[in-house]
Amino acid sequence: MRFAHPEYLYALLLVPALLVFYILMFRQKREDMKRLGDPTLLTRLSRTVSPGRQQIKIALLLAGVACCLGALARPQLGTKTETVKHEGREIVVAIDVSNSMMAEDIKPSRMERAKHAVRTLVSKLEGDRIGLVAFAGAAFLQCPLTADYGAVELFLSGLDTETAGVQGTVIGQALYTALRTFGENPQGNRAVVLLTDGEDHEDDPLTAARDLARAGVRVYAIGVGTPAGEPIPIRDATGQVTGHRKDKNDTIVMSRLDEVTLQQIAAETGGAYYPSTLDETEIDAIHEAISRMDASAFESKQFTQYEERYQYVLAFGLFFLCLEACIGDRRPPRTEGQGRFE
């Protein structure tokens, strides 16, 4: 036996309080009767009043109140097992968290635009599983595949350029991490959504894209930034811009969107490339493309739930209250007028 809302059990303290109230009320009633007139006469006038019936009515009332209050706590007893199967697609979002994503050539910044795009995509999903990979100078799994979109939002909100301990941009490594996240799964229902400015000078993303294509994984790339580029701001603790990042020659670094690389990655896997737009039409296009992919059963879990028993407790409570209302506190006289003039 367990209670879904055990805090309501404190309301049962009302039952002994009512019992004390009735005891005091009957005691006061006897005192009032003594002061009203001759006890013998009053006893004869109230011979049909049954103290036993009154006590039964009080007991039924208290039992009914106790059951109704107990039902509020939702008693549960016994368990049942349900098998839940999900059908859908699996999506891994690989999001760039390198310093270049702090550039503000698209407002409010590349990073915030990318995170908002992920939130928009998640809001369109129904039953599909989604995971999150963050990458900069290294790639790591931020959130495993899950249908709990609230958990994805929680992990996403914590992403920033401080998430990655090593700076850089390793798109290829991010793609391999996404591939490992899928695990063993039938082909045809897996996709990677890549959000980055495309500047990769450290590994070979096209080789990784070919490996994903052989595994049946499509990559939909979103270019976050502009080809013209923008300096990467440096901010202090208050968020104010104190300067811009420079290279070894003390020259301000211009971070530019590399659309060519992203287009090649998408083409290798049979996916598509989209530039980031303010109205996020690219998210609608990607969601539509993913929706056309074959859905498959990717999860089967057994959930054990407690059986609700509050309805039985409530039924007893209503029965006691109805029974109390049907019982009078006077016993019928044996003959008409008996007990009144004796």
Image: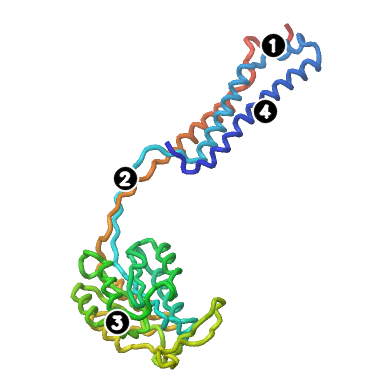
Query: Looking at the image, is 80 positioned above or below residue 29?
Result: below
Query: Looking at the image, is 261 positioned above or below residue 157?
Result: below
Query: Looking at the image, is 86 positioned above or below residue 236?
Result: above
Near-viewer residue (121 or 113): 113
Left of 177 or right of it: where is 17? right
- Name the element at disc 3: strand
Residue 13 falls in which quadrant of the image?
top right
The amino acid type found where label 4 is placed reads Phe
Residue under pointer 3: 272
Precedes in sequence: disc 1 or disc 2: 2
The amino acid type found where label 2 is placed reads Thr
Precedes in sequence: disc 2 or disc 4: 4
Precedes in sequence: disc 4 or disc 1: 4
Determine whether label 2 and label 4 are within 8 Å by CB. no
Near-viewer residue (182 or 11): 182
The residue depicted at 32 percent of the width and 70 percent of the height is 92
The amino acid type found where label 3 is placed reads Ala
Mark sitting on residue 81: 2
Residue 39 falls in which quadrant of the image?
top right
At label 2, counting other C-alpha atoms closer than 10 Å, the crowd grade (few under 14, some 14-19, many 20 or more) is few
Q: CA distance from mark 2 to mark 4?
A: 46 Å
Percent of width and height locating residue 149? 40, 64
Residue under pointer 4: 21
Percent of width and height locating residue 54? 63, 21
Determine whether label 4 and label 1 are within 8 Å by CB. no
